[in-house]
Amino acid sequence: MQAILALVGRPNVGKSTLFNRLTRSRDALVANLPGLTRDRKYGLGRLGERDYLVIDTGGLGEETDAIDALMGEQTRAAMREATHLLLMIDGRAGVTAGDEALAEELRAMGKPVVLVVNKIDTTAPTAALAEAYRLGLGEPMLISATRGSGLEALIDLVVPMPPAVPGEVPPADEAGEATSTEAPANTTRPPRSEGTRIAFVGRPNVGKSTLVNRLLGENRVVVFDQPGTTRDTIDVPFERDGRRYVLVDTAGIRRRARVNEMVEKFSIVKALDAINAADVVVLVLDARAGITEQDAHLIGLALDAGAPLVVAINKWDGLSEGDRASVRRGLDLRLTFLDYAERHFISALHGTGVGHLLTAAHRADDSSRRQVSTAELNRLLEGFVTAHQPPLSRGRRIKLRYAHLGGHRPFTIVIHGNQTERLTGEYKRYLANAFRRALKLVGTPVALEFKTGD
Ligand code: GDP
Ligand code: GDP
């Protein structure tokens, strides 16, 4: 089961600092992105071999000890989704009435609670500890979110080790640095014989079930209602134009059986399950509603997961030319970092554009499985570097020497050189985009990993 850690605490104790530390951002993709990703509340993280989801419940911004202000509906919702509650306090400030009230609330949830004492870089640990024990939440974990110390012990405590693969020596955890930006080792992704696994992901009411029912109505369903294995997911295989697909964990499929069910409850965890189980994510947006905060959360998760992505803008029917132009402008502004994903304007209700969506999905799937020889990557790298030299650092030119494929999902290219840690975000984006174009990758993000040799 996926570990889901909810960070709870008064404003300014360091929740968002810890969140950023614990979640990986694939730097070439996500760094410095405008708008959507700045105020991320959900993020995937990986430390050594352990994967987890982190929810930052912050954003209330009021310095107060009043429990109502500390515990908004959003925080409570996050706590219901979490497997572990991390109560953060500021070791420098000591325990306040607000911390005590939060401790009380968290205990009442009946889930494992871990007390995290932050900012121990600026305070004497013994004093912080004595205070922290007063909360009666057991052994406090001492950390410094800004320095990244104590995080490994924290993750050790809450996230179980993945089961060992027989015959494989588990790699040692990376010491010291808390957050790994390395792509999961997943270098071979053969196409699956049962077809491209697609998850339609979107907030309630954007039209997912209409879309799914249309697809299944028009195409041959190979086997219907195959029960899920471990969770309550249902996979539905079907064929279109001789190509096989599997719809993964789609709320709409479930709903087909229970027509009068109320609007589905938005669950970021269910969406994450679907993203992880799919080869390609089709993010469904509602043209009439713009991009909401929930959409932004989903986009962030799909990015974190490195999932091949197609964006479907639904309910395109009945919009005036003026409305359409303004929707397109809005998407251009807010989805700049998703420029690798194809956008399809569709009407699930009328079936317009729905076929193209499937074609886009298998194109993205194929792209994400591309094999590229080291020779070709090196030839391309040389060309890119000649066309646009890396910047100087401390008077020396940063050198990029050779490249090879590092893995799929995300499609990762490893580049060796010197002083690579000094490359600017801008230059990394230039390289990522250049590789993506040259390799004709569509719908799949390209992550770069740099190794410095000297
Ligand atoms: P949030 O409101 O709980 O999300 O808190 P933030 O993450 O925004 O942090 C509040 C302030 O505390 C910021 O100025 C941080 O730089 C600072 N801070 C966070 N963690 C640490 C830490 O481990 N040590 C020190 N000295 N400062 C920290
Ligand atoms: P879900 O919650 O994402 O599964 O959304 P539904 O499929 O239940 O659709 C929500 C509402 O949007 C329903 O009233 C649908 O009839 C309507 N809807 C779905 N697709 C379209 C579309 O392409 N055009 C229009 N105009 N309405 C649509």
Image (spheres, rainbow, N blue to C red):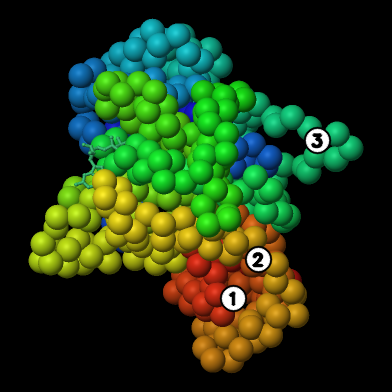
Local SS, label 3: loop
Q: Residue furthest right?
A: 167
**Residue on which disc 3 sits:** 165
**Residue on which disc 2 sits:** 370
Rounded to the nearest angstrom, the CA distance separating label 1 from label 3 is: 33 Å
Residue 355 in sight from this viewpoint: yes
Q: Is residue 272 above or below residue 183?
A: above
Q: Are marks 1 and 2 in contact (CB under 8 Å)?
A: yes
Going by the numbered disc 1, the residue's amino acid type is Leu
Q: Earlier in the sequence, mark 1 or mark 2?
A: 2
The quarter of the displayed image where residue 82 is located: top left
- Callout 3: few (<14), some (14-19), or many (20+) C-alpha neighbours within 10 Å? few
The quarter of the displayed image where residue 331 is located: bottom left
Q: Are marks 3 and 2 in contact (CB under 8 Å)?
A: no
Quadrant assignment for the N terminus: top right
Q: Is residue 44 above or below residue 242?
A: above
Residue 413 image offset from top left, x and y in percent: 64, 67
- What label sits on residue 439 in the rendered view? 1
Which residue sits at x=27%, y=27%? 263
- Callout 1: few (<14), some (14-19), or many (20+) C-alpha neighbours within 10 Å? some
Residue 125 image offset from top left, x and y in percent: 52, 28
